[in-house]
Image (tube, rainbow, N blue to C red):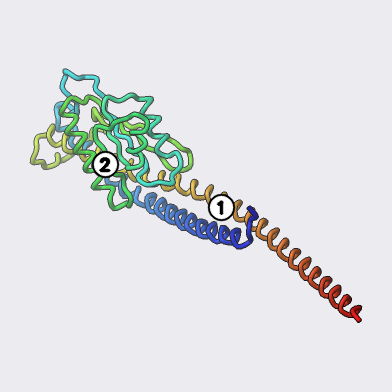
Amino acid sequence: MTERLSDVNARIASARQISSVVSAMRAIAAARMRDARLRLDSVRRYAQSVGQAISRTLPLASQAFEMSGPQANPGRRLIVAVGAEQGFAGGFSERVLRAVGAAGPDELLIVGDRAIGLARQLGYEPAWSAPAAAHLDQIEAIADQITEEIWSRANQGIATVSLIYAAPDGADAIVSRSLAPFDFKRFAHTRNAQPPLTQLAASALLAKLAEEYVFAELCEALTLSFAAENEARIRAMTAARGHVREILDALGARSRHLRQEEITNEIIELAVNRAVSRDVSSRAADVP
């Protein structure tokens, strides 16, 4: 079947539309990544404030509170994996789930709709799942859900909880962070000239502060993952835009070739018609 110039031009128009969509998606991803980076400072300041409260409370407690499961299940491990919420992010979720497979958890909590679907394809059945943030304003609510789920499962026999997520900055780094048992040793004991006024026993207050600090850690991880997902989407859209440009170059060359063929055929047809016309005129002149 002979390719027509009109068909090629229609394909060029479609490719240009795709290029516009790809460019728009890339711009949106870049804006979201920038906003996530700006949000990180406030998230980290909040975690620092909670950490300072823990440091001031530690001297009031006879022993640090630790979140742990019943002694009957001392080795049960839980992993929270944060993957992609939306598509066009390349192998973002695959990298996170490969890290989960290496860890071999007893229970798996997955955040991110795309990651959930991929996990099931790979043979993982999450014990709990939730969407990841499609917008930064959703992060606090999601972190709150995860915190409640972690604390609930810790009281039902989970001994250790780890968090796995991707970090931005183009390094394709996967971060694994321990959330429980909560390590109070990382906080300095701040001796207070005037002890803080509290309405809870020191151990109970530390338990609440530990939960709040885990919430802050989850907010930071979700924000970093949000930035990393959009960074991966930028790379995917950049590659797609390059591929579309190659297609447009090839279609443009094909269009010029077909146009040249049309022009050549028109010239040939015109020349033939003129030759035929002259021949007919000559024969007519020869008729007596």
Residue at the image point whose x is 42% and y is 48% from the top? 230
The x and y percentages for residue 124 are 32, 30
Residue at the image point whose x is 25% and y is 37% from the top? 214
Q: Relative to 24, is 77 on the left or the right?
A: left
Can you tell which of label 2 and label 1 is closer to the viewer? Answer: 1
Q: Relative to 156, is 111 on the left or the right?
A: right
Q: Secondary structure at mark 2?
A: strand
Residue at the image point whose x is 37% and y is 47% from the top? 86
Q: Is 171 in front, or is 38? A: 171
In the picture of the structure, the residue carrying the numbered disc 1 is 244
Q: Callout 2, which amino acid?
A: Ala
Q: Is residue 219 above or below residue 272?
A: above
Cβ atoms at labels 2 and 1 below 8 Å apart:
no
Q: Callout 1, which amino acid?
A: Val
Looking at the rendering, which quadrant does residue 154 occupy? top left
Q: Is 118 in front, or is 164? A: 118
Label ID, residue 130: 2
Residue at the image point whose x is 13% and y is 32% from the top? 203
Q: Secondary structure at mark 1?
A: helix
The x and y percentages for residue 209 are 19, 38
Decide if residue 48 is in sight here: no
Q: Relative to 33, is 14 on the left or the right?
A: right
Looking at the rendering, which quadrant does residue 106 occupy? top left
The x and y percentages for residue 118 are 37, 36
Q: Gap in Å between the C-alphas at discs 2 and 1?
A: 34 Å
The x and y percentages for residue 181 are 23, 27
Q: Is residue 159 above or below residue 45?
A: above
Circle 1 packing at 10 Å, graded few (<14), some (14-19), many (20+), is some
